[in-house]
Amino acid sequence: MDELRQVGRIAADVTADYLAGVGDRPVWQPVPEPDHGWLSGQDLPAAGRSLSDLVDDIRTRMLPYPMGNGHPRFFGWVNSAPSPAGVLVAPLAAALNPSCAGGDHAGVLLEHTVLRWLAELVGYPHRPGGGLLTSGASMATVIALAAARQRAADRQGVDIRADGLYGLPPMVMYMSAEGHSCLRKAAELLGLGHRRVRVVPVDDRFRMDVDALRDLVDRDTRAGLLPFCVAATAGTVNTGALDPLDEIADVAAEHGMWFHVDGAYGALGVLARGAAAGYAGMARADSLALDPHKWLGVPVDSGCVLWRDPALTRATFSLVPAYLRDEREGGLGWFSEYGPEQTRPFRALRVWATMSHLGRDGIIRLVDTTVQRARRLAAMIIEAPDFELLAPVGASIVAFRYHPVDREDGLDELNRRIPVAVQHRGRAFLTGTRLAGAEALRACLLNPATTDDDLALLLDEIRAAATVGTAPAPP
């Protein structure tokens, strides 16, 4: 233990120094040889190495080559900077090292608290047992759609756990053209097949077109298919768009479909000033996915699924060996009865620490600050003659493109190569996408440390990358 104590203090200093200096280093840089070869081609050492050697390797060969998402000029994907509180308690969760499948211990009890906190934050009705922490929204979506499939089979009189999909009419799920790929993956994993996933067109604000949804459901019903689930999005990854949740909930109710909301990134946007009206209907969802490791900054991994009916989800997954039976009167059972994982890590500690450290007011301030910063970037784009905004700002994402004055040809190719060029220059990190058939740039703002100067530098870096390519930026 003496070595652990001594090297642990060194590791804490290395961690603090790294986080303190993030903004002074390149956002991202390629891993050069020999570090690239060392990282990917090591042999397992025959003799064990000291803890101090391990920390030194991390300091010299890993910390210089981050993904970049701790930096205030990281605008890529939907990846946040880690919360200090989450970083602080991660070793303590590892020291306890429980399995949070169930039982009467701190990891399990704390998970019930953070699930209730998350539900209360976004205004989702919460009953004891009505949620689960997961690795992320992909697993949360599998769990939610499995419960939706279970309910649809029950209504058809089919025991899906015993007989699978045999005896059921083909089941159909509906998602927006801007919906996340995890929805299709979940449908495939659950045996539904992606041909039974209907992609609903979007309107001019990149939201699900409800009239088109109604037409698709009516057509499938007449064809003898079984519409069982519609998955809406509260904050798409391309533009941050909010589907018209209340109207979609109405369609789901009319046809007896499960209503799922993917709020992995955007559900917490309900806390921003003036945003609540756009989230009307989210509380009507049968299930809601959200990721504390996105907007809240909880260190990965930390996803969450909430559901309205705990009994149904438990019926979908519960399979309890004799040695794990919970005989307590009125017990909720084990968390492992509500999802596919048996051994589950102590995810709740990082969520609890992050949320406790921020407090409700701090969480609201974090969300609102980043939303306002995204709106500021949009205003700068509108004011600039060589940029154009491609969509209304949704949540905290800005979709736009570089459009030099007097240039109309080759804009797709230009905007397609800009993100990689910006990344290689190292002063900002940007990603691209396709939007309405055109190449687009997208900036996701999740870091409250981002300033107006950082936004101006991003636009300048795009201009420079478009004209001089991927040469490293001057120091």
Image (cartoon, rainbow, N blue to C red):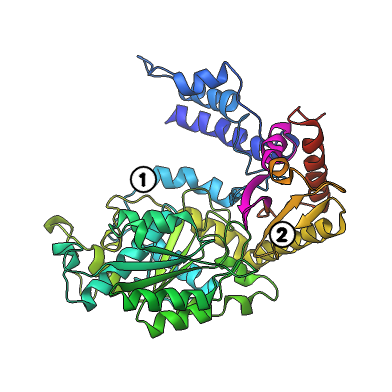
In space, the residues marked 2 and 1 are separated at their CA atoms by 47 Å
Determine crowd level at label 2: few under 14, some 14-19, many 20+ residues with C-alpha closer than 10 A: some
- Residue 309, image x and y in percent? 33, 76
In magenta, the rendered stretch is: 416-442
From the viewer's side, name the closer residue of 359 and 26: 26
Counting residues from the start of the chain, the first of labels 2 and 1 encountered is 1
Is 430 inside the magenta-drawn segment?
yes
The residue sitting at the left extreme is: 322
**Where's the N terminus, which quadrant?**
top left
Give the residue pinned by disc 1.
97
Name the kind of residue labelled 1 in the image: Asn
Q: Which residue is mark 2?
A: 390
| Nearer to me, 38 or 465 | 465
Q: Position of residue 194 (x, y in %)?
A: 36, 57
Q: Which quarter of the figure has residue 207?
A: bottom right
Q: Amino acid at mark 2?
A: Leu
Label 1: how many Cα within 10 Å (few below 14, some 14–19, many 20+): few
Q: Is residue 281 at least partly visible in the picture?
A: no
Q: Position of residue 11 (x, y in %)?
A: 55, 33
Could you tell me which residue is drawn at 33 percent across and 49 percent down? 98
Q: Is residue 412 above or below residue 320?
A: above
At horizontal 60% and vertical 56% (from top left) the residue drawn is 238
Q: Which label number is shown at residue 468?
A: none
Q: Is residue 292 magenta?
A: no
Q: Residue visible at 84% across and 50% down?
A: 386
- Which part of the image, by quadrant, shows the C terminus? top right
Q: For mark 2, give the secondary structure.
A: loop
Q: Is residue 445 visible?
A: yes
Q: How many marks?
A: 2
Q: Secondary structure at mark 1?
A: loop
